[in-house]
Amino acid sequence: MTDESRIREDIVRLSKSLYDRGYSVGSAGNISAAVDDGILMTPTNSCWGFLDPAKISKLDYDGRHVSGDKPSKEVFLHRAFYETRPQTGAVVHLHSTFATALSCLEDTNPDDCIPPLTPYVVMRVGEVKLLPYVRPGDEKMGEMIRDLGGRYAAILLANHGPVVSAKDITSAVYAAEELEETAKLLVMLRTAKTRLLTPNQVQELRTVFSGY
């Protein structure tokens, strides 16, 4: 099996796992992964529970569709991560319930919308920036991500959902799951006095697990 074939199979397997566990519903969300000569992406209006590896969209590095079904209308969102974060090997965009809920709350801190509640959200996700709402499919979304200069591995799109990048597809999926579970905790704890990790504790995690 070639590396591209393996990545196609990984996209199908991990997408189905997310779908089966309710991280994606209907045809919501999109996943991409880098290969030697371009980017693989889940097709537009496809259901993650029933993907065909042969029909996954393939684009060249200039964003041109070269094979497979038509790619997601949000391809520019993914490309912005690949272009500004050279270490990116995959991008996962969910419409998951609790992260999306946080993106809709008026008092969510746009500069730190997933505060350091647990060590694993620090290790796997890092700081998360909330970007202003634009309609799905609007190329301004990609421009806003480029304007961040690669400083964030994950963002929240206001009233839309999370986007997470990582070194490979498995890491990106794990990070997206961690973000969603942390968002769930944050929503559950909104009315409670909450103890966050201290700046020193966060820095220790970043130092010890920099390559996690």
Image (spheres, grey):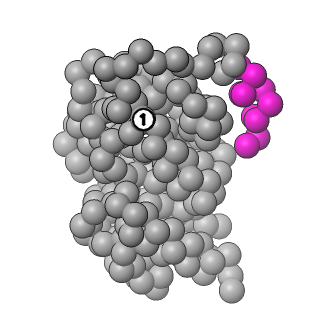
Bin the neighbour count of mark 1 within 10 Å (Cα to Cα): few under 14, some 14-19, many 20 and up.
Answer: some
Q: Is residue 154 above or below residue 191?
A: below
Q: Dividing the image into 4 quarters, which one contains the C terminus? A: top right
Is 78 left or right of 5, judged from the image as shown?
left
Which residue matches tag 1?
Answer: 185
8 or 184, nearer to the observer: 184
Q: Quadrant of residue 9?
A: bottom right
Is 53 left or right of 5, judged from the image as shown?
left
Question: Is residue 139 visible to us here?
Answer: no
Is 10 left or right of 96, judged from the image as shown?
right
Q: Is residue 18 above or below residue 198?
A: below
Please give the name of the residue rendered at 30% of the width and 47% of the height, measured from the top-left corner: 97
106 or 181, nearer to the observer: 181
Is 99 left or right of 91, judged from the image as shown?
left
* Residue furthest out toward the front: 192
Question: Is residue 112 visible to us here?
Answer: yes
Q: Name the spot of residue 73 as percent of width and height, x first.
A: 28, 58
**Three-letter code, disc 1:** Leu
Magenta-colored span: 203-212
Please give the name of the residue rendered at 45% of the width and 28% of the height, measured from the top-left corner: 114
Q: Name the spot of residue 56 as percent of width and height, x first.
A: 43, 76
Please give the name of the residue rendered at 61% of the width and 54% of the height, measured from the top-left corner: 171
Q: Name the spot of residue 206 as percent of width and height, x first.
A: 71, 28
Please give the name of the residue rendered at 37% of the width and 67% of the height, measured from the top-left corner: 19
Q: Is residue 37 above or below residue 193?
A: below
Q: Quadrant of residue 66?
A: bottom left
**26 magenta-colored:** no
Most common SS among magenta residues = helix
Q: Name the spot of residue 176 as percent of width and height, x first.
A: 49, 48
* Residue furthest out toward the right: 208
Q: Secondary structure at mark 1?
A: helix
Q: Dividing the image into 4 quarters, which one contains the N terminus? A: bottom right
